[in-house]
Image: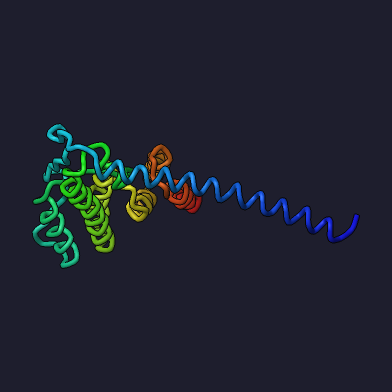
């Protein structure tokens, strides 16, 4: 078979593959922009029944004579709790607009940002307690963070390290089960790190 003919056939195949790929991308783009358009015209919905996060401060180990880093984290927690907190994890901006209406978006987005700030501050608080070797209180903070849906990698791994260092290794498997059942995009990576902690125990 002539070399020119073979090259021509390969060229035709490449063109067809590229055209199909572009068609798929074009379809995706159309769906994406249609969703964005619909979201920006979504009507306002009643959000009075949304379950905002209510924090029982007695469940968190606030201390008056803690180190400076711990005090700073505690103050940030208290400050964040002065604002409404709502976990909208897994929802895009378009999802929020479509479900609750464009008019509610700014408020709900702020509430979701408060949630993200809250779990990050809890992680920082737990880390500060861990660095001070206050493992019991660090575990309390980390456990609470997980209970309200945190999927921060360091929260899982440091809590697992505390369990290992305090001979509660069986609790690490429960953390693995928890993260694997979540919809976190980091779940496989976190689960792998937790397995390594068990293996090193």
As rendered, which of 127 and 90 lies closer to the eye?
Answer: 90
x and y percent of residue 76 in the render? 15, 59
As rendered, which of 52 and 75 lies closer to the eye?
Answer: 52
- Which residue is pictured at 41% across the width and 37% down the height? 181
As rendered, which of 184 and 145 lies closer to the eye?
Answer: 184
Q: Is residue 168 left or right of residue 110?
A: right
Tally the numbered discs: 0
Q: Quadrant of residue 14?
A: bottom right
Q: Farthest residue to the right: give it.
A: 1
- Quadrant into which the N terminus falls: bottom right
x and y percent of residue 160 in the render? 37, 50
- Which residue is pictured at 12% across the width and 50% down the height? 81
x and y percent of residue 2 in the render? 89, 58
- Which residue is pictured at 43% across the width and 40% down the height? 180
**Colour mode?**
rainbow
- Which residue is pictured at 11% across the width and 45% down the height? 57
x and y percent of residue 184 in the render? 39, 45
Q: Is residue 14 left or right of residue 141?
A: right
Location of residue 1 with respect to 177 vertically, above or below = below
Q: Is residue 81 left or right of residue 115?
A: left
């Amino acid at each position: 078979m002539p070399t020119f003919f073979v090259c021509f056939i390969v060229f035709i195949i490449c063109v067809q593959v590229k055209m199909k790929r572009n068609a798929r991308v074009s379809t995706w783009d159309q769906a994406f922009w249609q969703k964005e358009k619909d979201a920006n015209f979504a009507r306002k919905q009643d959000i009075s029944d949304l379950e905002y996060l209510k924090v029982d401060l007695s469940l968190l180990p606030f201390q008056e004579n803690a180190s400076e880093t711990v005090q700073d984290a505690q103050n940030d927690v208290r400050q964040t709790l002065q604002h409404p907190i709502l976990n909208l994890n897994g929802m895009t901006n378009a999802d929020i607009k479509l479900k609750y209406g464009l008019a509610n978006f700014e408020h709900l987005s702020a509430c979701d940002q408060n949630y993200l700030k809250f779990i990050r501050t809890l992680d920082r608080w737990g880390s500060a307690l861990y660095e001070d070797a206050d493992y019991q209180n660090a575990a309390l903070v980390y456990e609470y963070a997980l209970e309200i849906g945190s999927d921060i990698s360091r929260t899982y791994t440091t809590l697992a390290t505390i369990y290992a260092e305090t001979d509660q290794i069986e609790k690490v498997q429960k953390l693995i089960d928890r993260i694997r059942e979540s919809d976190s995009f980091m779940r496989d990576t976190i689960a792998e790190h937790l397995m390594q902690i068990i293996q090193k125990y």
